[in-house]
Amino acid sequence: MAYIKAISYYLPECIITNEDLVRDFPEWSVDKVAKKVGVNTRHVAAEGETAGDMAEKAARQLFKEYGVDPKSIDFILFCTQSPDYFLPSTACLLQDRLGIPTSSGAFDYNLGCSGCIYGMAIAKGLVTAGIAKNVLLLTAETYCKYLHPSDKSNRSIFGDGAAACLISSEGFAEIGEFSLGTDGSGANHLIVKTGAARQKEKTGASQIDDEGHVWFDDYLYMNGGAIFNFTLDAVPEMMDQVLAKNGVTKDEINYYVFHQANKYMLNTIRMVCCLPKEDFYVNLSDTGNTVSSTVLIGLKDCIDNSVIRKGDKVMIAGFGVGLSWGGTLLRF
C-alpha cells in the first residue's frame, strides 16, 4: 500500500487581479470575469522564476512544515510542461539543490491537468514494488509565460504555482486504485505549437478558430469548447471506473476534489454527475487554474480547514491537455 504523508505548495509573489486585466481589456467588467471563471486573483511567476524554482520552494515548504529530512527521500517525480531546460531533467537539478541523496531516482514527466493523478500512480507503483520508500512528487507550471498578451480568455483563467507531495508506505491518506485515460487525437485542442523539435523556430503565424479566438503558433492555444465537451464525455465514465475499481458506491464518497479548471466547467461536471454541492470542491478564486498543482493545492486547503477528516473517502481527478485524464480514491 501507498499513502500520502505530506502536502505543501508555493505560489509566486506577483499577483494579477481582475482589475489589472480589465485595464488591459476595458470591454470586460470585473464582475463578468469573476462570475464566468471564478477567479479573482492569480499568481504569476517572475521573469526569471522557473517551474524548477517554484518546485524547490514547494519542496522546502513541505520539509519545513512536516519536519521531513531531505535525506529520507529516495525518488523524485517532477511533473511539468515548462521545464528549466530541454535537458537535463529538472528533477535531476532539484535532487542536487534540495540535498536529496545521489542514490535517489529522479525524472521529469510531461503532463498537464492530469499530472498529479499520474504522478500518484507512478509513486504508488514505486512504493508497492519496493523500489522506493519515500517518493517526492512535485508539480509546477509557468503557463502564464506561454500566454499571448492579447489572450484575455486564458489570461483570466491560468495562474502559476507549484505543489509538493510525499508518498510513502505510511501516512494519513491511503491511495486507492486508478482509472487513467488518453486520447491523443485531441492534442491540437490545447497546445503550444512551436519551440520544440517538431517546429523549433517561432513562426509568428496565427489564425482564427471556430469560436472566433486567435490561435497563435508561438503561444498557448486552448479550444475551450472542445476541452469542455471532452471533459463532459470523459469524467462521468472515469468516475464510474474509480468507484468500481475501489469497490465503493457514489453514496460512500464524502468529498470530491477535481482539477480546478474553471468555475463554470466544475459546476457543469457537478450537475451532470449529480453530485452534492456541499461535497464538491470549487475554490480557484485566489489561485486560478494552476494546471497540475490544482488537486494538491485543493487537498491541502481542505485538510487545513478540516473540510476533509479522518475516515473520509475522497475522490480526486484531473483532466485536460493531452488529451489526458485520471482519477483515484483516497481513504483518510
Image: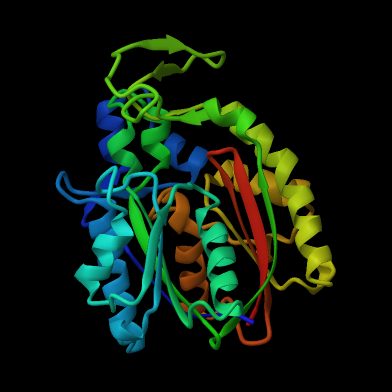
Residue closer to the observer: 100 or 210: 100
Q: Residue furthest left?
A: 48
Q: Residue at x 27, y 51 (%)?
A: 88
Q: Residue furthest front?
A: 103
How many tags in the picture? Answer: 0
Q: Residue at x 39, y 44 (%)?
A: 81
Residue 11 can be seen in this image = no
Q: Residue 67's spot in the image, x, y percent? A: 32, 89
Q: Residue 115's spot in the image, x, y percent? A: 51, 54
Q: Is residue 312 above or below residue 50?
A: below
Q: Residue at x 21, y 57 (%)?
A: 13
Residue closer to the observer: 36 or 255: 255
Residue 5 can be seen in this image = yes
Q: Residue 253's spot in the image, x, y percent? A: 75, 71
Q: Residue 295's spot in the image, x, y percent? A: 52, 61
Residue closer to the observer: 124 or 113: 124
Q: Residue at x 51, y 48 (%)?
A: 113
Q: Quadrant of residue 320?
A: top right
Q: Is residue 30 above or below residue 100?
A: above
Colour scheme in the image? rainbow
Quadrant location of the C terminus in the rendered image: bottom right
Q: Is residue 53 above or below residue 224?
A: below
Q: Quadrant of residue 27?
A: top left
Q: Is residue 16 left or right of residue 214?
A: left
Quadrant location of the N terminus in the rendered image: bottom right
Q: Is residue 225 left or right of residue 25?
A: right
